[in-house]
Image: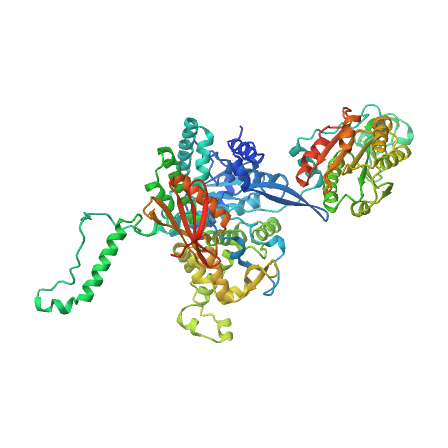
Amino acid sequence: MALKIKKDHARFRDIVRGRIKRDLKKYLQKGELIGKKGKELVTIPIPTIDLPHFRFGERSQGGVGQGDGEPGDPLSPADGPGGGRAGQGEGEHLLEVDVSLDELADLLGEELALPRIQPKGKDRIVSTRTRYTGVAPSGPESLRHFKRTYKQALRRQIASGSYNWRRPVIVPVREDRRYRTWKEVPLPETNAVVIYMMDVSGSMGDEQKEIVRIESFWIDTWLRRHYRGLVTRYLIHDAVAREVDRDTFFHTRESGGTMISSAYRLALEIIEADYAPSSWNVYPFHFSDGDNWSADDTRLCVELLRDRILPAVNLFCYGQVESPYGSGQFIKDLEEGVGGRENVALSEIADKEGIHPSIKAFLGTGR
Amino acid sequence: MHRPTALPARLHDLRTRIEGYARACGLDFFDTLFEVLGFDEINMVAAYGGFPNRYPHWRFGMEYERLSKGYEYGLSKIYEMVVNNDPSYAYLLESNMDVDQKLVMAHVFGHVDFFKNNFMFRHTNRKMMDQMANHATRVRRYQDKLGVEPVEDFVDRCLSIENLIDYQSPYVKRRPDRGDEEEAEERKVAQGFKTEREYMREYINPPGFIEAQQKKLDAEAVRKKKVPERPERDVLLFLLEHAPLERWEHDVLSIVRDEAYYFAPQGQTKVMNEGWATYWHSRIMTEKALDASEVVDYADHHSGTLATQPGQLNPYKLGLELWRDIEDRWNKGRFGKEYDECDSFVDRRQWDKKAGLGRQKIFEVRQHCNDVTFIDEFLTPEFVMEQKLFTFGYVEKHQRWEVLEREFRKVKEKLLHTLTNFGQPAIAVEDGNFENKGELLLVHRHDGVDLKLDYARDTLRNVQTLWRRPVNLVSKVDGRGTLFRHDGTEHTSKRHDL
């Protein structure tokens, strides 16, 4: 039975998306539920629309609380009023439980309607593993199943009345012997590597990096859901590219110019050295504000991509983050050069709001 | 029609057991129908405020999204829900463990006992289940006829002022009976006191007195011509009676008002009611219903409901502790003149007259109090100290929320303030013909806390669309009297002192 509420829910979603009743949009508040990933917090957006009422201004009101603390001590920011709303339905107990990263990934997928990834070369790259799956009356002696053989012999001796409990000696005969059998199970090889590349030239500010950080967290979460043992590599570049660790990746700020080809060249070296395309699913992600040094370098980038990188990877994603200095030309050049390819995804991210659509553009390809 | 399905045998047995315990404790409740729902259904019913059938409106969808997202992401789940109705309806979540189901049942019987016996609920419609379905049908019919959008927009506007009802009105008589008051058009003349001795008249009714009487009568006459005669707190009622609404609008507004009045007592007894239900589930569970194997799960969930956070008062916790405190005090005879006048700390600490009146007292209190009187009467300095209650507020200088005071008087004052009138500003219709131009005048009785201004302006606009003529609101902003006005196209505000 379809629930009656679905209609109300659909209507609410339409209001949130701004399809109907636009005048309510200004009452839209971005609430969020907070989930945990180890020490990191992840938030799950819960939009609410608060119809205007005559009510007290929050800051002038205050209230009564319970717990430790001396007068003058601050309440922690999360404890401020506004979180607690009195439900009008009598008594809703809310219970807190944990959420796993895998579930988060699934929910992300559901939310953005992401297709499941079809790992490349599912049929081609197959390794086999042997699994012991059963027991048979014949086989090599090295695989004799001692316990089962003993049991069989015991059963036969009891049935035939030759078992003597005073002197319980069990002697198996040829027919009692049991051997392990095995099956060969084909295992699709699903190794994957993500190569994050980020432009750290002077024009990329903290806010831009925050966007990259959030987006790469979600991309990580989603890809890990599909590939056990996901490897991540981090490259930063201004006019030259180098490989760094995760921490440096998100916190470095350089001031040089921008030569994007340097990053692509380094990525290509890494792929060729460590990740043979025949057995790896390779995902290069590149984030930049799109302000490349010269048209020549851009041309070089397109060539590198078209001829060397794209044939070797599952999906190449380029996200252009808007920076205070405006965003550049690079995404247009890429669009021209390699835009039609099925394993290329390009997206422009204006601000934090743009992260969701951008993730959808990247991962919605299902590659 | 909403038909409760039969409980599975196992739950039926549990229910019979728990109901027996509850009755043995002296709880007195309506027949209660439990229904087992899957999480999706329970989220739906919860979004509808406990009713399976409500009129279509997006805000139920919003609530549903919040609840089901919370559930799906594993952050929260609804535990129990019960509807004030005769018979009462309560819902059990299918996937709950037996120990949870027991806890919920015991808790529910506590609530239903409260609904049935507390005076605040005496005027609520006990057939609300049917009434809500009835409302749903009416609103749907208007939507079929006029289109979804206009009806929903109108509902939005009504909801924006649904809190402007008179929370006390079901319990007192606000308006004098209009009987034989044939209003004479001519001016009434003050007669003074009657006397049969003419020579005494001057002494009994000196001229100054007659003059004062005459002034009073004149003022009365002016007031009687005014609509409303006295400030009307039930703004919705005033609009129903005086605003030029179309018939369907009139009906929708009255639906919103009915439902607001139905839910109001639940908001006014939240602390008591939750405390009462929690008190009884903990009694019933720990004294009777709990199996040894369930103790750990029970303790876990029970403590979960009682958890407190510094910036929020947990009504379950506060209520439960207060009930226990009252029971303890009346058991030990810690009340009355003698106890109140005793100022020896040690004596008070050890005070125990073995009065044994606790049980009797709490049953009495659950009948005659609401949250405001409950706190007003039974909050003690000792309790405030033991429970570590404090007031907090926003400190502009430090740009943060801070703990302000722990003093009893301040805590109690603040607590009562947040509970009085549901913690909402007191706003009344002062005049339906303001400045003799058919404008509406609302007055906010300012008690030290300003209105949230952007919201007030938008709400005023919504009132205007119902009233059609310009509407005005008098309030104070930063200590200065201010009049806000919306005339249908724009907002204005100016200084105004009443």
Q: Find residue B395 and report its horizontal and vertical position in percent.
A: 58, 60
Image side of residue B343 versus residue B125, left or right: right
Q: Find residue B266 and report its horizontal and vertical position in percent.
A: 44, 48
**Nearer to me, B318 or B196:** B196
Relative to residue A1, is residue A74 depicted above or below? below
User: Please, which colouring scheme is shown?
Assistant: rainbow
Say if residue B8 shows up in the picture: no
Point out the image quarter for the C terminus of chain A: top right
Q: Find residue B365 and report its horizontal and vertical position in percent.
A: 41, 57
Residue drawn 42% across the image and 32% down it: B139
Image side of residue A60 versus residue B171, left or right: right
**Nearer to me, A327 or B51:** A327
Q: Find residue A204 and report its horizontal and vertical position in percent.
A: 76, 43
Figure quadrant of residue A188: top right
Residue drawn 43% across the image and 40% down it: B488
**Nearer to me, B279 or B16:** B279
Say if residue A342 shows up in the picture: yes
Figure quadrant of residue B313: bottom right
Image side of residue A17 versus residue A159, left or right: left
**Nearer to me, B300 or B486:** B486
How many numbered marks, from 0 up?
A: 0
Image side of residue B497 versus residue A245, left or right: left
Residue drawn 18% across the image and 53% down it: B187
Relative to residue B192, is residue B143 depicted above or below? above
